[in-house]
Image (spheres, grey):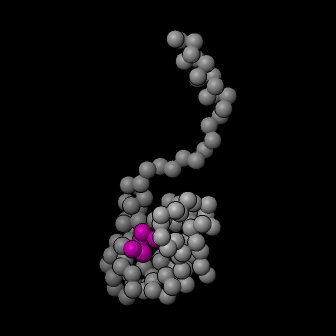
């Protein structure tokens, strides 16, 4: 399974090698730090991409917890998400925008 940033309609000029080898990432998941695993989960929750990587990351974090790792990944993920700005992709009501502009123009 391999994805390219080009597949997501993103301008990648100047990025160099933009290929993401998901199989390679999955095979190395056990070598990643707990922080990196959490960041993968945060990326999925924030951007909504690569859900399969987030699931595998959570499985690895849970496995580490069972093996005695005390890293507080739940709070790390929660705090990381709180620190990110709110994304709002809603489309404004064009009528409201025009009324606001007309109101501002009439005040001048």
Q: Residue at x 50, y 59 (%)?
A: 46
Residue 84 image point, x, y percent? 41, 54
Residue 40 located left or right of residue 71: right
**Residue placed furthest toward the left:** 70
Residue 92 image point, x, y percent? 62, 37
Most common secondary structure along the magenta stretch: helix
Q: Is residue 108 above or below residue 70?
A: above
Work out whether residue 60 or residue 2 is closer to the camera in this orientation and state it.
2
Quarter occupied by the N terminus: bottom right
Q: Place residue 2 in its image quadrant.
A: bottom right
Regarding residue 36, the answer to whether it shows in the image is yes
Q: Is residue 58 above or below residue 100?
A: below
Work out whether residue 80 or residue 22 is closer to the camera in this orientation and state it.
22
Q: Residue at x 36, y 66 (%)?
A: 76
Residue 43 image point, x, y percent? 48, 65
Work out whether residue 28 or residue 6 is closer to the camera in this orientation and state it.
6
Q: Is residue 96 above or below residue 45?
A: above
Residue 94 image point, x, y percent? 66, 32
Regarding residue 55, the answer to whether it shows in the image is no
Work out whether residue 54 or residue 74 is closer to the camera in this orientation and state it.
54
Query: Which span is picked out in magenta?
Result: 36-40
Q: Residue at x 52, y 11 (%)?
A: 108
| Count of numbered labels shown in the rendering | 0
Q: Place residue 21 in its image quadrant.
A: bottom right
**Residue placed furthest toward the right:** 95
């Amino acid at each position: 399974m391999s994805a390219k940033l080009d597949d997501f309609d993103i301008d990648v000029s100047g990025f160099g090698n933009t290929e993401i080898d998901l199989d390679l990432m999955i095979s190395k998941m056990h070598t990643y730090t707990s922080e990196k695993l959490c960041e993968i989960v945060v990326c999925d929750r924030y951007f909504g991409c690569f859900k399969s990587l987030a699931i595998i990351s959570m499985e690895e974090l849970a496995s580490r917890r069972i093996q005695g790792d005390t890293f507080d990944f739940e709070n790390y993920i929660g705090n990381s998400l709180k620190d990110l700005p709110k994304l709002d992709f809603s489309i404004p009501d064009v009528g409201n925008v025009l009324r606001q502009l007309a109101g501002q123009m009439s005040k001048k």
